[in-house]
Amino acid sequence: MTETLSSAEVRLQQHAAPEGEIAAATHTLVIGPYLTRIAQRSAAGPAEAARSTDARLDEATGLAAAIDLDVIRSVVLPVQRIRPSTYLGKGRVEEWAGTIKAEEIGLVVMDCALSPVQQRNLEKAWGVKVIDRTGLILEIFGRRASTREGTLQVEHAHLAYQKSRLVRSWTHLERQRGGFGFLGGPGETQIEADRRQIQERMTRIERDLDSVTRTRGLHRQSRARVPYPIVALVGYTNAGKSTLFNALTKAEVMAQDMLFATLDPTARATRLPHGETVILSDTVGFISDLPTSLIAAFRATLEDVIEADILLHVRDVSHGDSQAQAEDVDTVLRELGIEADPNRLIEVWNKADLLDADERTRLLNLSAQGRNDRDSATPILVSALTGEGLSTLESRIEARIARRRTTFAVTLPPEDGASLNWLYENAEVLDRRSEESGTIHLAIRIAPEKEPRFLNRFEAARRIAGA
């Protein structure tokens, strides 16, 4: 049956529930075609070489489960050399064709980046739909996007990916599916017309995104008029960023033990223990081999990360590949033009509650929490779930913000309640003491942009520390 892009566009607006029903009925095989260690040393970066094949396969299976696919089997296939036509060797392709037919597999997920030719040849050989890691991640992002901007960005990345994979053959492999079409696919008998319609749709999306970007610019200008420090959470997907966000802000952002549970950014204003207001921003989790098109598409969404005063790099230290995941996050940050400045970055070792006693003790000894060093470059061990270490984290955030702020001593008469209220609203009150007469002595810390107003109002204030 031929399906034009027009009807495919209609499907993009459908609710995710039918997609979940279709996915749950799709018997899925996840294949990890990973280079052997010898091949890795010459072809892969240090993070990829350090990652265990079992962990990589578990992650790929988790990605498939994130869109409700019925994964009935997952397997690692060591690869000595990547074949340009089918990625796997001819013998392997033929061997798995029989298994796929016998086990009534409806979809094969290849945990690698396939070229359009490789994807088509594998579909021909196996007689089922094949998607690669990029297609799977795009499908997940298509399900998770909830804001207009997120939906447009994902659709644009999806269309760019889909455009290169339109062919005239294999229409018997296509099924009527929901989502962004990776589990189904566009009609392919009117290929040039479809390609033209895709390009027209991409152009319209780019215009819409320009409008959204201008609106975000106005929001940034509005926020700049009431300047609060931005604290952005970054980290590998499922590291516990949303749970930490909820714990620090008392919000109720979706937080599940699921890859890419959060896609659209969420920001909340929250007050730190000494009264400083900050904007905490929860962002999409990063992942190894994140498609370049998605990094570019979500650059606008990650503006809070790019402009943040402080970055909280949240790591799941209970995960066996925590170090490799951290290196993947650093790679994506560099691609966004963000260098790991130790004065800007705080490393948060999350999920302490999942550690055994020995590992927990070891990490405590390595972290700042074990030495009461609140402003060092060492990581902080926390559990966003139980609250362990959160007060230390908040103190570290305050200390980092304080580096560019001045501390003053202020004395107020007991009747000057208006000035006292102004200080609590506009500064951090670090210390407060009252004499028997009612005179109030305060130590306050104030942001540079508010300092002129402060000095104009409190001319007798005495500088204690800072610039």
Image: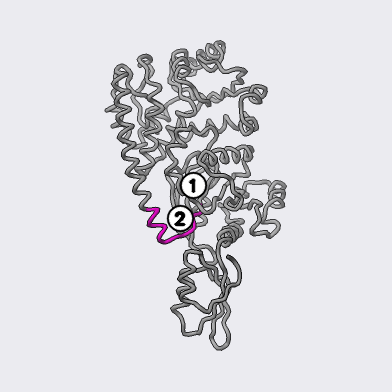
The residue that appears at 61% across and 50% down in the rendered structure is: 342
Residue at image x 29%, y 26%?
A: 197
Q: The magenta stretch spans which residues?
A: 219-231
- Total marks shown come to 2
Is 27 left or right of 379, judged from the image as shown? left
Above or below, 76 against 340 in this view is above
Q: Is residue 130 above or below residue 212?
A: above
Q: Position of residue 232 (x, y in %)?
A: 50, 51
Classed neighbour count for the residue bearing mark 2: other residues with Cα under 10 Å, few (<14), some (14–19), many (≥20): some
Quarter the N terminus occupies:
top left
Question: Please, what is the three-letter code of the amino acid marked with disc 2?
Answer: Ala
Question: What residue is pinned by disc 1?
Answer: 306
Q: At which x and y percent is residue 163?
A: 37, 24
Q: Front-most of 368 and 351?
A: 368
**Residue 1 visible in the shown view:** no
User: Residue sitting at 38 percent across and 32 percent down?
Assistant: 21
Q: Position of residue 137 (x, y in %)?
A: 46, 33
Question: 168 and 15: which one is in front?
Answer: 168
Q: Dot 1: within a 10 Å radius of its alpha carbon, few (fewer than 14), some, or many (20 or more) residues?
A: some
Quarter occupied by the C terminus: bottom right
Asked whether residue 275 is drawn in magenta, I would say no
